[in-house]
Image (tube, grey):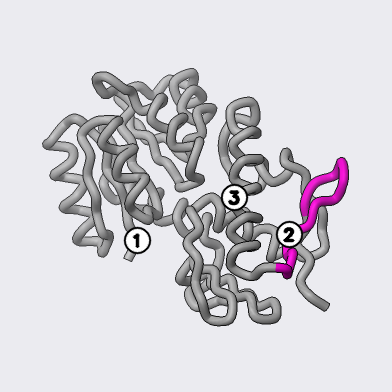
């Protein structure tokens, strides 16, 4: 069951989209303003967000920029404006897709599903194992000797990307480009901070193992135990 947050200040649009997506098997969360959307995103493990552009107080572009500071969850913009400049503005803010109003509910659900599945790119149940460390891609859980640790969406995605490419060195810019879909000038520092948190959590979960290593002036690599 995919978990989707609908963000729109129009209750009719919210009710219509929610009803359709629930019939399609989605678990739906709702927010009618930007602040509420950010609050939900901090507490719910979301698979995607449908985000209206034109909202009072905080518009969808601003919400998306704030989201990209902490999450790489797919964002699909809804807007009454379909000009190229508007679409580019949304995508440059870190959005993944853009759908102009009025739109087909069938197309909305299809675009959501494709974005979610493209991001996951894994079969449910696939587990990466490195000695006693397990990265469960289906459950999106990290375990060591059977003990789980909590990783945010972006932290988990960074760890998974490195673990899928053991021994390869990646710079911050490469990690940003391949894991986090956001403008580099707004997200590079946050990637650095997030990468530091991943290493700290791994150190607490499996002390002394040093799975992620720093390669001076080049970046990071994942080195499983021999």
**Relative to 126, residue 213 above or below:** above
Element type at marker 3?
A: helix
Which quarter of the picture shows residue 34?
top left
The quarter of the picture where the C terminus appears is bottom right
From mark 2 to mark 1, how far is it between C-alphas?
Answer: 30 Å
Task: Say few, some or many: other residues with alpha carbon within 10 Å of mark 2 (under 14 / 14 to 19 / 20 or more).
Answer: many
Q: Quadrant of residue 104?
A: top left
Query: Badge 1 local density, few (<14 within 10 Å), some, or many (20+)?
Result: some
Q: Residue at x 40, y 25 (%)?
A: 62
Q: Are marks 3 and 1 in contact (CB under 8 Å)?
A: no
Side of 45 relative to 216 (left or right): left
Q: Which residue bears the numbered disc 1?
A: 2
What residue is drawn where x is 46% and y is 47%? 73
Q: Select label 2 or label 1 by which is in front.
A: 2
Q: Nearer the viewer, residue 163 or 144?
A: 144
Can the viewer see residue 107? no
Range of magenta residues: 208-220
Name the residue beneath numbered marker 3.
197
- Measuring from the top left, give residue 77's x and y in whole percent: 38, 35
Label 3 CA crowd tier, 10 Å (few <14, some 14–19, many 20+):
some
Give the residue number, with chain letter if any, for mark 2. Answer: 212
Residue 2: x %, y % from top left = 34, 61
Tell me whether the residue at label 2 lies in contact with that at label 1, contact meaning CB atoms closer than 8 angstroms. no
Residue 30 forms part of the magenta stretch: no
Could you tell me which residue is drawn at 65 percent across and 80 percent down?
Answer: 132
x and y percentages locating residue 121 in the rendered image: 55, 63
Instruction: Name the spot of residue 218 as percent of width and height, x first.
Output: 85, 44
Kind of element beneath mark 1:
loop
* One can see residue 116 in this view: yes
**Residue located at (26% from left, 47% from top):** 105
């Amino acid at each position: 069951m995919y978990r989707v947050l609908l963000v729109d200040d129009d209750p009719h649009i919210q009710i219509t989209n929610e009803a359709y997506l629930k019939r399609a098997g989605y678990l739906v969360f709702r927010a009618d303003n930007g602040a509420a959307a950010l609050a939900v995103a901090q507490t719910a493990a979301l698979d995607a967000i449908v985000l209206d552009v034109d909202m009072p107080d905080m518009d969808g572009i601003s919400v998306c920029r704030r989201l990209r500071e902490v999450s790489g969850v797919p964002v699909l913009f809804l807007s009454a404006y379909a000009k190229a400049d508007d679409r580019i503005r949304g995508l440059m803010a870190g959005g993944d897709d853009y759908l102009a109003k009025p739109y087909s509910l069938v197309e909305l659900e299809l675009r959501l599903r494709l974005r979610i599945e493209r991001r996951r790119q894994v079969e449910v149940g696939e587990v990466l194992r490195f000695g006693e460390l397990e990265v469960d891609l289906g459950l999106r859980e990290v375990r060591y000797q059977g003990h789980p640790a909590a990783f945010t969406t972006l932290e988990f995605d960074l760890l998974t990307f490195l673990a899928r490419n053991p021994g390869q060195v990646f710079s911050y810019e490469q990690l940003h480009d391949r894991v986090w879909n956001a403008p580099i000038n707004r997200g590079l520092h946050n990637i650095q901070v997030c990468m530091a948190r991943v290493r700290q959590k791994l150190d607490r979960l499996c002390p002394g193992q040093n799975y992620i290593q720093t390669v001076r002036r080049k970046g990071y690599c994942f080195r499983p135990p021999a």
